[in-house]
């Protein structure tokens, strides 16, 4: 089992000048503005990401295609060089396809939009193949809350099945393994485990080896009061038992924290550092999760930590080292 990372925002401050870091500390530069300023630079430095992967003792990287990204603008020579470098370093690659804006329309019941979304996704699949990735991962799109019901929802699910089959067939031609990941509750579709398993069974019934990239942090969002405070499994990681082993290959590992008493503070945190045990996943949960992953034959675990606290943003590498050392003791 390989342990890897999608770096999310963990390396962004390393692309700031000293002056911009001061602006960030003082509040003159906001965190969202920093994201918008350096995200493409951070995602483009794939060699640097591979170097960090090696430094913190991991052996897999997932490239984040969330918008904005630079991947379709990379020259063929750059892509070939990165592929060679990753092979030399013994770091395997997966590509997370875009999941916002145009990419969300893989689920739309407006056929022209769905076709356009799939055409865009295929360009990213081509990029994945050229850079030496073994697999790609996509979200099930997003549906406005007022259309996530009744006949509209039926139409959306039909479109999602159609897009998944189309993209899986394209991946098969490229010798890439396609994954579909469960959404957060904010996306209104592809959230519940039963719905995702039904989608996987429908698509796989046609002979396509599509895998389920289960993201437990996304599943935790169902417990937010705004979404009805839906109950979680006990222990929380036992939800993995419901997934057939042949559906699993790469999974995502991240946590979710719900503030029990917000009072003007954030109501939740996405992807807090796992070693701090702030969310639902404590060490005993992770230890049991490791056993379940091995039982189910999981091949790749991608950690997706993200931070927002100023000290963590400015010391992202240290946070990565601490968390990776913690996880290395568990996922052995």
Image (cartoon, helix red, strand yellow):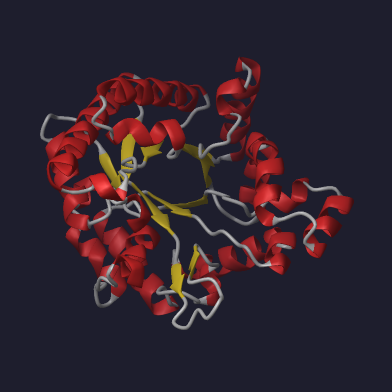
Residue drawn at point x = 30 percent, y = 65 percent: 227
| Quarter of the image where the C terminus is located | bottom left
Where residue 251 appears, x then y in whole percent?
A: 37, 52
Number of dots carrying numbers: 0
Q: On the rendered structure, is 62 left or right of 234?
A: right
Q: Quadrant of residue 210?
A: top left
Residue lying at the far bottom of the rendered structure: 261
226 shown above or below 62:
below
Q: Quadrant of residue 27?
A: bottom right
Q: On the rendered structure, is 257 left or right of 196?
A: right
Mark yes or no: residue 97 visible.
no
Mark yes or no: residue 170 visible.
yes
Where residue 53 appears, x then y in whole percent?
A: 61, 49
Q: On the rendered structure, is 21 left or right of 313?
A: right
Where residue 46 appears, x then y in whole percent?
A: 64, 36
Residue drawn at point x = 29 percent, y = 51 percent: 188
Residue drawn at point x = 68 percent, y = 66 percent: 312
Residue lying at the far front of the rendered structure: 146
Where residue 203 appears, x then y in whole percent?
A: 17, 35
Which one is in front, 47 or 270?
270
Residue drawn at point x = 37 percent, y = 55 percent: 186
Residue lying at the far right of the rendered structure: 19
Q: Quadrant of residue 260?
A: bottom left
137 shown above or below 27:
above
């Amino acid at each position: 089992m390989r342990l890897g990372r999608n770096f999310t925002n963990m390396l962004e401050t390393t692309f700031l000048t000293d002056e911009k870091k001061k602006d960030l500390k003082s509040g003159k530069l906001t965190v969202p503005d920093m994201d918008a300023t350096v995200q493409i630079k951070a995602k483009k430095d794939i060699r640097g990401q591979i170097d960090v992967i090696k430094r913190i003792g991991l052996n897999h990287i997932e490239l984040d295609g969330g918008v904005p990204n630079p991947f379709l603008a990379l020259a063929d020579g750059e892509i070939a060089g990165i592929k060679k470098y990753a092979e030399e370093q013994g770091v395997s690659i997966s590509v997370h396809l875009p999941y916002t804006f145009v990419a969300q329309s893989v689920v739309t019941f407006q056929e022209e939009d769905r076709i356009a979304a799939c055409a865009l996704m295929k360009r990213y699949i081509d990029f994945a193949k050229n850079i030496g990735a073994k697999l790609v991962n996509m979200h099930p799109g997003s549906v406005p809350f007022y259309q996530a019901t009744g006949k509209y929802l039926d139409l959306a699910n039909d479109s999602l099945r159609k897009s998944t089959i189309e993209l899986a067939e394209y991946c098969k031609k490229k010798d890439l393994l396609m994954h579909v990941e469960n959404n957060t509750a904010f996306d209104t579709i592809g959230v519940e485990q039963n719905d995702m398993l039904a989608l996987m069974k429908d698509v796989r019934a046609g002979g396509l080896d599509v895998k389920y990239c289960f993201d437990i942090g996304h599943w935790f969002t169902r417990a937010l009061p705004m979404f009805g405070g839906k109950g979680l499994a006990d222990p929380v990681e036992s939800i993995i038992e419901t997934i057939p082993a042949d559906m699993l290959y790469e999974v995502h590992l991240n946590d979710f924290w719900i503030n029990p008493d917000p009072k003007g503070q954030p109501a939740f945190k996405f992807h807090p550092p796992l070693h701090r045990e702030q969310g639902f996943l404590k060490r005993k949960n992770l230890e049991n999760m490791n056993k379940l992953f091995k039982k189910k034959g999981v091949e790749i675990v991608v950690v997706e930590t993200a931070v927002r606290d100023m000290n963590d943003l400015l010391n992202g590498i240290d946070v990565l080292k601490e968390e990776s050392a913690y996880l290395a003791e568990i996922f052995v």
